[in-house]
Amino acid sequence: MNFAAQIKIPATYMRGGTSKGVFFKLEDLPQAAQVAGEARDKILLRVIGSPDPYGKQIDGMGGATSSTSKTVILAKSDVPNHDVNYLFGQVSIDKAFVDWSGNCGNLTAAVGSFAISNGLVDAARIPENGICTVRIWQQNIQKTIIAHVPIQNGQVQEMGDFELDGVTFPAAEVQIEFLDPADEGEDGGAMFPTGNVVDTLHVPDIGDFQATFINAGIPTIFLNAEDIGYTGTELQEAMNSDNAALARFETIRAYGAVQMGLIQDVSEAASRQHTPKIAFVSKPKTYTSSSGKVVNHDDVDLLVRALSMGKLHHAMMGTTAVAIGTAAAIPNTLVNLAAGGGEREAVRFGHPSGTLRVGAQAIQDTHGQWQVKKAIMSRSARVLMEGWVRIPADTF
């Protein structure tokens, strides 16, 4: 009996923010995977170890959570005034599916570092010491992101004293700017896809809820914690062991996706796991984070808990943080009201692992439509391993 040999593909395993994933240069992928399609998806699934009915991804690089089942493909940009094209694939853990519908804000922090270290940024743009500004074209959402990457002696500086809740060790700070983060959509004005900052979301057999639907960073559904029976101080253990509650959230998410116009029928939500996100907010309360650190009510403007790929996230997705900052800047959204209302250009919110600050500036145009030109937050990134990843030659 003949057995397929293994092939090896150059790859880098990186942490970006509170996520980690496998990074590839487009040109290093097998020829069939250098274009979108079945071959690419099969390769990435095999690299990560999916689909895995055991939910562990033992036979791959994935870590069996939404934060660690991620892939990134980078190439020199063909978009004027950009350095690198960034394509993100969220790999399902238990299904043969790669979701290309959105960005990963956390891994964005590692894109600039990888691009500099792998020759995707022109050498003339890299200082000997200082900050390298990397202009990223995010292909999934067709948006510009700017990463400010520290450089020391001509190399990416990874070590530093910047602490990010949800990450054990300090590292160098990477400031990320999400330019024009709201999705304008085909009709030119869909930051709030319904036209309202607050809507009623009707979910059959579950109830009616106030909701803010927003397309900024990533399509997100915000609910009030109290309306759905939570306090806003919940940690992963309490929620992710409650299968009935998770199923309820998924049903709410599916109906919200329909109301946002992202899908036509709730049945389509199963094949669109990455977007929209669903999150719930509450006014500040004192709680103990997952690390044992006490977050005092006067340390934060509001509390936010968000679900990703059907589970409560251990910290906060970067793109959802953009949605939080954007919604907080716009009066009378549920996020803004939880933070105390009024006009604001930044919020610090509490999440399961601690706190995070995100800034956004919102203005109204002459037609009364809200616009946000930039959202800013700080993350960090580090190479964990580099070399080759191996997969069976008959994978694709």
Image: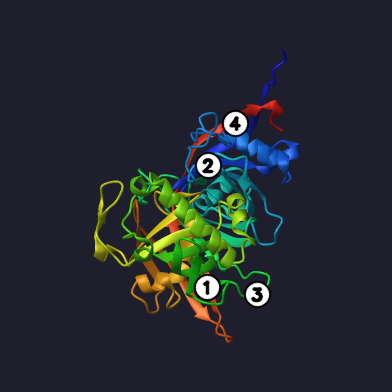
Q: Residue at x 49, y 68 (%)?
A: 201
Q: Are marks 3 and 1 in contact (CB under 8 Å)?
A: no
Local crowd at mark 3 within 10 Å, few (<14), some, or many (≥20)? few
Colour option used: rainbow
**Callout 4 touching callout 1 (CB < 8 Å):** no
Q: Earlier in the sequence, mark 3 or mark 4?
A: 3
Q: Which residue is mark 3?
A: 188
The answer to whether residue 116 is left or right of residue 42 is left
In the displayed structure, does residue 33 sit left or right of residue 204?
Answer: right
- Let me know if residue 121 appears in the view: no
Residue behind mark 4: 389
Q: Nearer the viewer, mark 2 or mark 1?
A: 2
Q: What is the three-letter code of the residue carrying label 2?
A: Ser
Residue beneath label 1, please?
Answer: 372
Looking at the rendered image, the quarter that the C terminus falls into is top right
Q: Residues within 10 Å of mark 4 (few under 14, many from 20)?
A: some
- Residue 26 vs 142, above or below: the answer is above
Which kind of residue does numbered mark 1 sit on?
Val
The reply to whether discs 3 and 4 touch (Cβ–Cβ < 8 Å) is no
- SS at circle 3: loop
Cα distance in 3D space between marks 4 and 1:
40 Å
Is residue 144 visible to us here? yes
Q: Say few, some or many: other residues with alpha carbon within 10 Å of mark 1 (under 14 / 14 to 19 / 20 or more).
A: many
Kind of residue at disc 4: Val
Tag in front: 2 or 4: 2
* Residue 190 position by quadrant: bottom right
Determine contact: label 2, label 4, CB under 8 Å: no
Label 1: which secondary element:
strand
Return the disc, 4 or 1, that comes first in the chain's sequence.
Answer: 1
- The image shows residue 75 at horizontal and vertical percentages of 66, 48
Which numbered disc, 2 or 4, marks the residue that appears first in the sequence?
Answer: 2
